[in-house]
Amino acid sequence: MPNNAGAAAMQPLNLRGYEELPLADLADFPSLAACHAAWLAAHRSLPGRAAPALPAVIEVEALPPDVMPYTMLLDYLPEERDVRVRLAGNYVGERTSADAGGRRLGNFFNTHDAAIVYASMEQVANLRQPSLARRSYVALDGMQFSYVRLILPLSLDGHTVTGFFKTIEPATLQTGAA
């Protein structure tokens, strides 16, 4: 397990529709807590490194089945200030269409909300720590969404964040017309 003693804490982004929650609140969200536990279990030791390395993957078998429709694996594209959807659960896949470059933040969110999502992922990448947050926004199709989500950093080399695991606590999902 990673040692986060002395690590920088997630900073509140103070943005409309976004509230960063302390990771200590994971106990209130059992499916997200199980995802976090699977991520912690996936940390590995690398030669010459004292601290465990970030995982490249999280085993599907370790995840609670109820999060699968809402889960996304994302590639981190800091040079483009964007992310690309590598894999999306059924619920997510039905909410948007893909273009030739794969689904990006602009396929899900207006410019303002895409910037909020990117800022939260950039913070996860910079700190190499998970983020638990409450989100509410109006999607491009006019539907309103509210939920609690978890973003977990992933790394191909164990250190540099190259992607994210993102999912929601299914019981918190609320939708409706805006």
Image: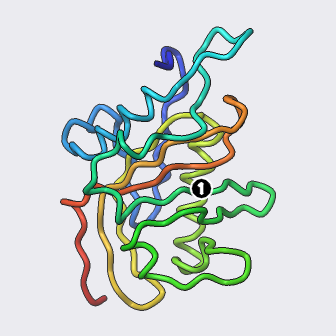
Which quadrant holds residue 153? top right
Q: What element carries label 1?
A: helix
- Residue type at the position of mark 1: Ala
Residue lying farthest to the front in this orientation: 61
Crowding around mark 1 (Cα neighbors within 10 Å: few <14, some 14 to 19, many 20+) is some
88 versus 25 height, above or below = below
Residue lying farthest to the right in this orientation: 79
Which quadrant holds residue 104? bottom right
Viewer-proximal residue among 57 and 126: 57
Which quadrant holds residue 87? bottom right
Residue 26 lies left or right of residue 109; in this view the side is left
Residue at image location 49% in from the left, 31% down from the top: 9
Residue at image location 31% in from the left, 88% down from the top: 178
Q: Position of residue 123 (x, y in %)?
A: 59, 45
Residue 23 lies left or right of residue 173; in this view the side is right
Viewer-proximal residue among 82 and 40: 40
Viewer-proximal residue among 136 and 156: 156
Residue 64 lies left or right of residue 104; in this view the side is left
172 versus 141 height, above or below = above
Q: Position of residue 130 (x, y in %)?
A: 47, 39
Q: Position of residue 4 (x, y in %)?
A: 49, 19
Residue at image location 67% in from the left, 29% down from the top: 158
Residue at image location 52% in from the left, 77% down from the top: 109
Q: Name the residue under label 1.
A: 119
93 versus 127 height, above or below = below
